[in-house]
């Protein structure tokens, strides 16, 4: 890859980071849903070791830290997100128990068999649901828990426009029964699966973006990459509005056997 291409990619990444850094969440979800998923986990020991993979700026990690015992490590590829993660944890007085580190979910910096709980909201798609389930299992203690949210098809048939969108964005999206089978095959007891309410997308994900988009576009006026990013996010919001009967996010909770 030439230097020019590389620098264009880096530039796009920094724009994407800037766009999402100002938001409380970088994916669909809510504090209620985090609490609900946690209600299927455990009981956890007082000194539980928890990892939140693809934590972003840590909206859900801080919810988790308020509700779960032990220590939490948030892991994300982007240093800007981790800086914000650590700053926000400090503001809430959580810095003794919550630490953000830069790293990849494809190469976890933990000892195998050391974690009580692996958490990941709206992020496992970066390495793929099946691969994440299989690789992350090694890092859990026997009887440890995994709680991940992932995009799912809700129906067996779906309109062409939305089928094509997902074929381009994430062809590994699957139906909930098939995803439960993957969880089972990867060596977990499927403890629970529930579909995230629509408010997790509309109120907690798209609405805050709509407010931030105007300021972002004004700051980057005339920058085609910034305009394209906003256009893509608006398209995602429009598609969700039109087709949310056909897809959404599912929270899967599994226990390592
Ligand atoms: N869990 C957060 C963020 C979800 S967005 C929330 O629900 O709000 C997905 C996150 O995965 C982003 O923060 C992105 O930077 C991160 N990510 C992408 N690829 C990654 C990788 N290979 N390893 C770790 N994090 C990654």
Image: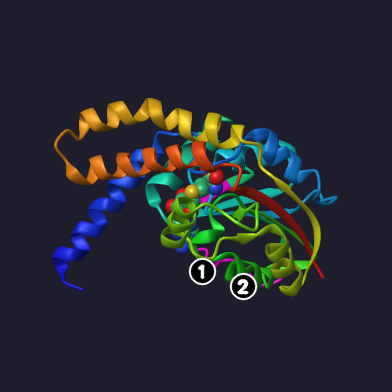
Quadrant in the picture for the C terminus: bottom right
- Which is more toward the observer, 141 or 197? 197
Percent coordinates x, y for residue 27 in the rendering: 51, 44
Q: Name the quadrant containing residue 31.
A: top right
Q: Which mark is residue 135?
A: 2
**Which of 156 and 173 lies nearest the eye of the viewer?**
156
Residue range of the region highlighted in magenta in the rendering: 99-114
Q: Secondary structure at mark 1?
A: loop
107 to 20, vertically: above or below: below
Q: Residues within 10 Å of mark 1 (few under 14, many from 20)?
A: some
The answer to whether residue 215 is left or right of residue 31 is left
Q: Position of residue 163 (x, y in %)?
A: 49, 56
Query: Distance between the Cα atoms at labels 2 and 1?
Result: 8 Å
Residues marked 2 and 1 touching at CB (< 8 Å): yes
Residue 106 badge: 1
Magenta stretch: includes residue 103:
yes
Which dot marks residue 228? none
Mark 1 beta carbon near ligand 1 (under 8 Å): yes
């Amino acid at each position: 890859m030439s230097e020019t291409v590389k620098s264009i990619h880096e530039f796009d990444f920094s724009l994407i980071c800037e766009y999402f850094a100002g938001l409380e969440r970088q994916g669909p979800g809510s504090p209620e849903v985090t609490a609900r998923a946690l209600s299927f986990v455990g009981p956890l020991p007082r000194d539980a070791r928890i990892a939140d993979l693809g934590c972003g700026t840590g909206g859900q990690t801080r919810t988790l830290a308020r509700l779960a015992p032990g220590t939490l490590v948030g892991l994300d590829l982007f240093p800007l997100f981790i800086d914000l993660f650590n700053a926000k944890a400090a503001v809430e007085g959580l810095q003794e128990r919550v630490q953000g580190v830069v790293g990849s979910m494809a190469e976890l910096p933990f000892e195998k068999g050391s974690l009580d709980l692996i958490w990941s909201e709206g992020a496992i798609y970066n390495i793929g649901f099946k691969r994440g389930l299989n690789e992350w299992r090694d890092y859990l203690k026997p009887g440890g828990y995994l709680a991940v949210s992932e995009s799912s098809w809700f129906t067996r048939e779906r309109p062409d426009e939305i089928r094509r969108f997902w074929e381009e964005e994430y062809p590994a999206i699957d139906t909930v029964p098939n995803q439960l089978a993957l969880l089972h095959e990867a060596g977990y007891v499927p403890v629970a699966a529930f579909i995230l309410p629509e408010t997790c997308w509309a109120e907690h994900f798209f609405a805050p973006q709509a407010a931030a988009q105007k300021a972002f576009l004004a700051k980057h006026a005339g920058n085609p990459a910034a305009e394209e990013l906003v256009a893509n996010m608006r398209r995602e919001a429009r598609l969700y509005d039109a087709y949310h009967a056909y897809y959404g996010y599912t929270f899967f909770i599994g226990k390592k056997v």
